[in-house]
Image (cartoon, coloured by chain):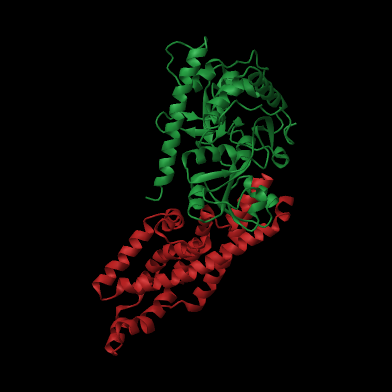
Chain colours: A green, B red
Amino acid sequence: MVRTPAGMRRAAVAAVAALSLTGLAACSGGDSDSAVPGSGGGSGDDLAASAPVAANLPAGSTMEKIKQRGELVVGGSLDAPLLSQQNPATKKVEGLDADFGRLLAKYIIGKPNVKIVNSASETREALLSNGTVDVVFQTYSITPERAKQVAFAGPYYSSGLVIATKKDETGIKAPADLKGKTVIAGANTPAIPAIKKAAPGAKIVTFGSDPECVQALKQGRGDAYVQDEAVLLATAKQDPSIQIQGKPFTSDPYGIGLKHGDAQMKQFVNDWLKQIQQSGLWAKVWKNSIGTVVQGEAPQPPAIGSAPGSE
Amino acid sequence: MNVITDHLGEFGDGLLLTVELTLLALAGALATGIAVAAMRVSPVRVLRAAGMAYVEVLQNIPLLVWLVIAVFGLPEIGVIAGLFTTSVIVIALYQGAYTAEAIRSGINAVPAGQGEAARALGLTFVQSLRLVVLPQALRTVVQPLGNIAIMTLMNTALAAAVGVVELTAAANRVNLAEAQPIWIFVTAGLAYMALSAVFGLVTGGLERKLAILR
């Protein structure tokens, strides 16, 4: 009973994602000569098919070890719509982060072989430093504090926090309006410090997952919900009782988490990122995920090394 | 270590809330436990059945599920309470089931002759339970109740999942900014250990004072 709304919403997200995938697959089949005839895969597979492979890997490097293993171990999520969500029907992980992970695997190994280790924001640094995962693709915001523990390639995407409210809310348009209000945020998200900074008087309530936060907003446990735009776009699209108020009020650069001190690997990943940005593959990945709910052309990708902590 | 000293305020607030949650939930659990244990040994069949049903239902569903049901489910039927209040009540009711079982084992440890003598003096069931059986039963189960107190303390960490910023949630928030999980969670762990050591000492002291030698 209780979980039904979340379950339905997830199912709906999955359905929309599946529909848009078929639509895009048809599209790319039409305008691309390189598409393999009769491949029948989703457009995520088409992306990997046209993705570059590194010419040569430095001997003894981390990349060579990954290639020998035949699998890139990615720290990520399985429950983030549009970014990295496992499709319950196909078991395939779909979204922006998931696609980038596959493309990087293709670049290193020659095949998009990825194993996703479900990592939590408390454990990402530890998983990287002890070598459990090779890279982290998980809406991993680059911050100077984190950069002391891990290395960041990128940023590969720039997002930001937005405010969502119930549809009938009229008093909250900007972060300053949150003053004195109760604001819901995801536990362990950058929303918490951002709310404290933008509206010092706000009372913050946190819940573990996005569906729980949305449920809490609808039940009136808070006046507003602050979350990453990429997450809230999917939510607001599915749930008409939720409305996004205004534009993002923070700039949140996502980095690719790497083991601290591996400068060779960081350089390598940044080179790959440059290649896919220039070839237009980056924009295709965006179209395939966030572009399914946001109108218009893909945005300009952020400049590599531009975020403090990623230099 | 700066990461800990810089955030002492947050850790302190979290620790305080953990202690408040634990003590309030324990008081509720003791009251619930005594009531349910009394039901389970009462001469009225319906009460015995209700007591047993309570224990089975509460013990056989995880606390986290109860918390999520209470926080997200009750508002659907129009009942909405604060997160802290909801957490205290849910943890108290849940731990109450375990407390009831501990107290019942204590009641069983009181020699049957005590109850019979009380009835022979003309005391009612409630009077004999309150004046003769329960005082002896509770003194027998100090140690198990101490363990339940420690379990309650540990279980308050689950309130973090429903938005109560107790010690675990506070540690999570500090880690979000500082990204040093090992230091931060080791510190939180040590704080929990210190608290349970206090419970252990209190229990040990009470046990020495109250134990009935048979």
- The residue furthest bottom is B121
Q: Residue A60: x, y in percent?
A: 67, 20
Seen from the viewer's position, the closer of residues B50 and A296 is A296
- The number of numbered discs placed on residues in the rendered structure image is 0
Instruction: Tell me if residue A293 comes above or below residue A1 in the rendering.
Output: above
Which corner quadrant holds the C terminus of chain B?
bottom left
The x, y position of residue A137, in whole percent, is: 59, 32
Residue at 41% x, 33% y is: A88
Residue B124 lies, in percent from the top left, at: 30, 85
User: Residue placed at 38% from the left, 59% from the top?
Assistant: B59
Residue A168 falls left or right of residue A282? left
Near-viewer residue (A61 or A141): A141
Name which residue lies at 63% across and 49% down: A192
Looking at the picture, does residue B125 appear above or below residue B77? Answer: below
Residue A87 visible somewhere in the drawing: no
Give how far across and how far down residue A264 sits, in percent: 71, 24
Residue shown at 61% from the left, 45% from the top: A189
Q: In front here: A78 or B36?
A: A78
Q: In this view, does B24 lie to the left or right of B57?
A: right
The answer, for residue A155, to whether it is visible in the render is yes
Q: Based on the displayed image, in which of its 4 quarters is residue A231 positioned? A: top right
Q: Does residue A255 appear left or right of residue B2 in this picture?
A: left
Q: Is residue B178 above or below residue B202?
A: above
